[in-house]
Amino acid sequence: MSDPVGRREVGREMSNPFRGFAPLFLRELKGQMRGRRAPVTFTVYLALMVVVLAGVLLVADSSGAKGDPTVGQVLFIAMAFTQTALILLLGPVFAAGAIAGERERQTFETLVSTRMTSGGIVFGKVAGAVGFLVVLTASSLPLMALAYVFGGVGPSTIFAVYGWDLLLMIWVVSLAVAASSLVGRTLWAAVITYVLVFLAVFMTGFLEVVQMSLRSAALDGAAQNSAPSVFFLYANPFSGLWELALPGAREELGLETALRSFTAYGGAWHAAVSAGALGLAVWAVSPLRRRWARPRLA
Amino acid sequence: MSEIPDRTPMPSADLAGPGPPTSPADPAGTVAPNVPPSSAASAPVLQVRGLVKRYGRVTALQGADLDVEAGAIHGLVGTNGAGKTTLLRIVGTVLRADAGAVSVMGVDALAKPSAARLLLGFMPDFFGVYEDLTVYEYLDFFGAAYGLEGPARATRIPELLAHTHLEGKAASDVQRLSRGMQQRLCLARALIHRPRLLLLDEPASGLDPRGRAELRDILKALAADGVAILISSHILSELADMCTAVTIIEQGSVVASGPVDTIAPAARVRSLSARLAGDPTPWLEFVATRPGVDGVAVSATGTVEIRFAGDLAAQARFVAELVEAGVPLAALEAPRALEEAYFESTQGLVT
């Protein structure tokens, strides 16, 4: 029998900064799908989407909008925003324990003493959590497709929204994994991630209102008619969704001349934040980095 | 020097696996590590020199030196807080050292931890397991984590399960295993990539006597296959039963290191426990006046506790003298060499 860990193989893998990604990704996905949490999550998620769907249809029916193509648009928008909100809520649940959970289970040293690199560990964890969220949201695709049946929403819009949601999954999971690698407790990692998501969703809107108020007070009438700056809204995870789910809404609000695409700039912002969070997580996971921890002697 | 050195040639072994192929016709030879055999054959598997580790103002290791030879079971002994775990974690490449050098079969483990991990298996003192996996999946995951391809894992896992007495548990959930079985599973995990150096931090803690005996047998088999084992424990009797060498560490410094027999001091005052048939009282004065005897007392259980100053030869003469005089000596117990060396060398200080 040949020696399973040979020199040629070593030479090849030594240069791979993501060594260990594949086995960890598969293990994470397997772990996420096992136990009671996965079926409970799927059930609750789909139940909420059905409630939103039924609510919109009931309102449309009672308001006499039956057969109106706007019903499909409203249905789609309601479900798209619900889905994005659920992603932001569930992402930390499935990612906050990525590294902190390894420390709590006392499996972290075992993991980092293997040939896996820090990059392989972090990206494997992120891919595992994102993979689960992708499967989860894919399960609601038939419900979303109902909007297409009602009319007013094209397949490209549906897929664009799913693409934006994929970016947000990576964003929120990256934040959670970074928090998880920096703090020792899953609970604290989840709390930190929820605070960051809260700030992104609500604080950006608040800062935008403040900024626009200050601007209108400072400028004369002519200047007020010029295009407003919406810098803070780029950081809002719902801004790109709004733009994608409601094509043309930006022009109707008169923002067209002022704004570049929320999808492009907002997407770039979220991608950059994700990259920064992942870099931080890779650094924090390395067992040989300089650290300032309490002594652990024996 | 090559980053990945040769592995010390070993006899064909179930646990450690075969050594590098020797025949040029062997296709496996194209992937086997290869460095000049002279260095691999003579140098210790593990060399630690001047290892220093500080946690803020606390110095956990202050210049520790250590050598572990191939096929040796090397005990690392010390009180809690002596620095055993810190040393093992640094050698295991999961903790950064502040100074010093660690070489695993010629690989600088501090500069090239990834290369060193190929050559060592590490079992930490506190370890968890992935409870959502089966035993087979657990080993398969770690096999993949060490870069073993699927066919190699499929061959290796049944071997390990057999040698760690878990062959019937492949499909069992890890969480359903007993503590002893989880311990053996973790050992199998550390062996999955056929390391040449095995680092075990308190591996027997929490095990019942049978579990300890099984673990001891497995480690002896590994050592017989040429694997170097560095094992920490503060259960001296356990180490004395299997260790070929020992390093005693106190306050982060190595106070003694080498084969057990050589580090035991040649002469000292030791406490001997003698059990006599019948009442020992009539013999106490005779015993107390023998050469080398420093004091005699009878314990509550009837054992005669003798403080004796002298080396092993003097002790042998003393015993012969008792027997010749007709002392009804039923048993005489002396402390084990390792215990003697430990208590002689340490003062119970911690960092």
Image (tube, coloured by chain):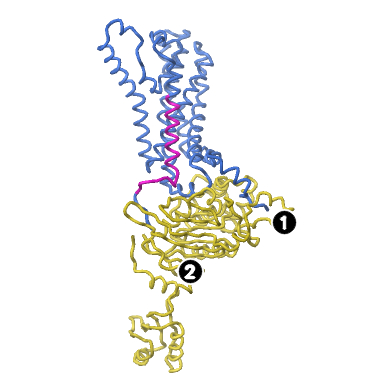
Residue B160 visible somewhere in the drawing: yes
Residue A133 x, y percent position in the rendering = 48, 30
Dominant SS of magenta comes to helix
User: Magenta stretch containing residue A288, yes or no?
Assistant: yes
Colour in which chain A is drawn: blue
N-terminal label among 1 and 2: 1
Which residue is more in the foreground, A59 or B265? B265
Q: What amino acid is labelled 1 in the image?
A: Ser
Q: Which residue is mark 1?
A: B23
Taking the view exactly as shown, the residue that stands out farthest to the bottom is: B325
Name the mark on residue A253.
none
Residue A228 magenta-highlighted: no
Q: Residue at x 34, y 8 (%)?
A: A226
Considering the numbered disc 1 on the image, is that residue within a helix, a strand or a loop? Answer: loop
Q: Dot 1, how many residues are within 10 Å of its Cα: few (below 14), some (14-19), or many (20+)?
A: few
Disc 2 marks which amino acid? Gly
Q: Which residues are magenta?
A: A269-293
* Residue under pointer 2: B258
Quarter of the view holding residue B347 = bottom left
Nearer-the-camera pick, A146 or A153: A153
Q: Secondary structure at mark 2?
A: strand
- Marks 1 and 2 close (CB-CB < 8 Å): no
Tell me which residue sits at (65%, 60%) in the image.
Answer: B12
At x 36% / y 30%, what residue is drawn?
A196
| Residue at mark 1 shares a chain with residue at mark 2 | yes
